[in-house]
Image (tube, grey):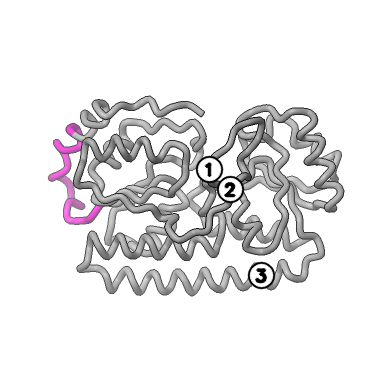
Amino acid sequence: MAKNKYTAAAIAVALAIAGCSRNGGANNDKKSVCVSIEPQRWVAEQIAADRVEVTSLMSGDANPENFDPPLSALRNASQADVYMQMGHLPWEQSLIEKLKQSNPGMKVVDTSNGIALITGTHSHDGHSHEADPHTWSSVRNARLIAANMLDALKDIDPGNADFFTQNYNRLTTRLDSLDNAITVALDSCSEKAFMVWHPSLSYFARDYGLTQIAVGAENKESTVRSMKEQIDKAVGNNVKVFFIQPAMDGGKSDEIVSLTGAEKVIIHPMAYDWWGEMKCVSDALTKQ
């Protein structure tokens, strides 16, 4: 995993540049929120709507394992009233420490607070994270993420607290409905396992008693032995669905499909349309 190349000095320069225009523009009365990734931005905007300006540090097509934010994104983060970290992404903590050196008054909120973390899913070929970072890939986790965001939004903009709360309540009603629909649909499915290239659906699998079988290594070539073991496991579990991300299959997805008979389904876990992605995953699993 590449180390973030930006120093506190570079971020300080970005902050100084941002300060030249911070008092200008039509939206200078709005509070500003910066989040780490696009799915977070979707959740935040369901609550804040147009009352708060929400930006994300990482675009949906970036790779979270070796991410280096562009200076434009750093400027947004540096001048935010609150930074809402996803929590447990490899690059977040060191970047936040540098941002706070440049902007000591910036509030930082970990939107994964309260989520029961999963460990061990990213241990491939000696590479391991302390916790599975994909906490957002769960409808139930999204409810906790939204609650953390609501508290932070009310803190920085108490004048809109009632507005935020109303939107939060509408969002949680939708989340509960989606969770119930997925639960009912998956309860009627006989197959309880699926394959995925990158282990990005661990929390989704836990929610619904599913088995996630990750056949790829994290940004590396899997060993022949480890891949064979996972493919054998998939065949033994009669897996029907194989989720991949567009840039992560290493050209081996078609071979895996031919060996397992599973249907390949492309997902975009880092996309802004969090709701659509959750529907994509659940629809693929329940149509079998």
Residue closest to the eye, 19 or 223? 223
Among the 4 quarters of the image, the one containing residue 7: top left
Q: Residue at x 65, y 67 (%)?
A: 182
- Measured Cα–Cα span from mark 3 to mark 1: 29 Å
- Give the residues drawn in magenta, as a range: 16-32
Magenta span has 18?
yes
- Counting from the top left corner in percent of width and height, residue 162 is at 28, 74
Q: Which mark is residue 119?
A: 2
Q: Earlier in the sequence, mark 3 or mark 1?
A: 1
Q: Secondary structure at mark 2?
A: loop
Q: Which mark is residue 28?
A: none
Which residue is disc 3 drawn over? Answer: 183
- Counting from the top left corner in percent of width and height, residue 134 is at 54, 49
- Measured Cα–Cα span from mark 3 to mark 2: 24 Å
Q: Residues within 10 Å of mark 1 (few under 14, many from 20)?
A: some
Asked if 281 appears above or below 175 in the picture, the reply is above
Residue closest to the eye, 133 or 69? 133
Among the 4 quarters of the image, the one containing residue 18: top left
In the displayed structure, does residue 44 sit left or right of residue 184? left
Kind of residue sitting beneath label 1: Glu
Residue contact at pointers 1 and 2, CB within 8 angstroms: yes
- Which marked residue is nearer to the observer: mark 3 or mark 1? 1
- Which marked residue is nearer to the observer: mark 3 or mark 2? 2
- Counting from the top left corner in percent of width and height, residue 238 is at 85, 53
Q: Earlier in the sequence, mark 3 or mark 2?
A: 2
- Counting from the top left corner in percent of width and height, residue 102 is at 21, 36
- Measured Cα–Cα span from mark 1 to mark 2: 6 Å
Q: Residue at x 62, y 52 (%)?
A: 202
Asked if 218 appears above or below 164 in the picture, the reply is above
